Amino acid sequence: MDTRVKICGLTTSDAVSASVEAGAQYLGFVFFPKSPRNVDIATARALALDVPMGVAKVALVVDPSDEALERITGEVPIDMIQLHGKESLERVTEVRTRFGLPVMKAVGVSGPADLQALNAYGMVADQLLVDAKPPQGADLPGGNGVSFDWRLVSKRGWNAPWMLAGGLTQENVVQAIQMTGAKQIDLSSGVESAPGVKDPAKIQAFMNAIRAA
Ligand SMILES: O=C(O)c1ccccc1NCC(=O)[C@H](O)[C@H](O)COP(=O)(O)O
């Protein structure tokens, strides 16, 4: 299966190496203090500097200020900004223009009404991350290990390339790809042994599951 994979929430060089060696095309670094996957700028910079050419480094931020984005983009050699909060269409456009980097906008899906947002953000973002909505009362806007009803996005397309996310694991990823037709997928907790702790064996097993499909 020719599927591109983003592994999100990397915090150590072992996890970065395991992801690169297993064949991930995108690596995500989370800048959100409440997350168990949060990295500070110095750590992210050190990790990003070790990523080989051809693997995209993505900075995940939640309703960031321009100042926060200036600090991150000024010090960490990133290739893409992932907006994972309640950023408006205008803010997506502003961030793209101001920082000169491609922007991926995350959109939470739980029912048919959410597909409108994908249509709209697909007109302004470079990529879409089609994710599950966080469960009621969750502390995090993403990375909660929950799936949504994949039939909602079955064989759908938007104006921008998209990634499927939300509760993907080595056990369900092949079915998720077959049902949705996703060409790109994103995951975080499905390759962890504990919240925020990436497991190299799970990363490899996940990539093997995709390749074997
Ligand atoms: O992962 C986090 O800690 C996080 C924190 C704040 C905003 C978003 C976050 N993660 C978003 C991602 O890109 C995840 O990979 C995506 O939601 C899927 O996560 P999972 O269901 O755990 O695979």
Image: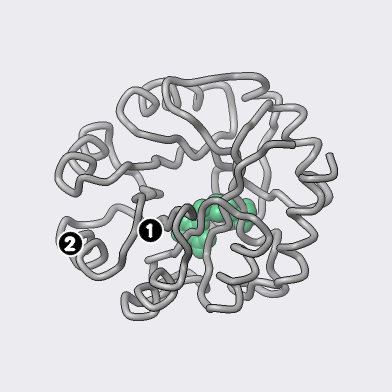
Residue 135 in sight here: no
Question: In the shown orientation, is residue 102 left or right of residue 98?
Answer: right
Is residue 16 rendered to the left or right of residue 85?
right
Q: Are marks 2 and 1 in contact (CB under 8 Å)?
A: no
Ligand 1 lies under 8 Å from the Cβ of mark 2:
no
In 3D space, how far apart are the residues under numbered discs 2 and 1 (Cα atoms)? 12 Å
Per the image, label 1 sits on a secondary structure element best described as: strand
130 on left or right of 2: left
Image coords of residue 28 (percent x, y): 48, 59
Residue 60: x and y in percent read: 40, 57
Q: Earlier in the sequence, mark 2 or mark 1?
A: 1
Answer above or below: position of 164 versus 51: above
Q: Nearer the viewer, residue 170 or 54?
A: 54
Q: Which residue type carries mark 1?
A: Ala
Q: Which residue is mark 1?
A: 59
Q: Residue at x 48, y 21 (%)?
A: 158
Tell me: 192 left or right of 82: right
> Within 8 Å: ligand 1 and the Cβ of disc 1?
no
Residue at the far front: name it. 53
* Residue marked by disc 2: 70
| Up/down of 54 relative to 199, above or below | above
Query: Which of the image's four quarters has the C terminus?
Result: top right
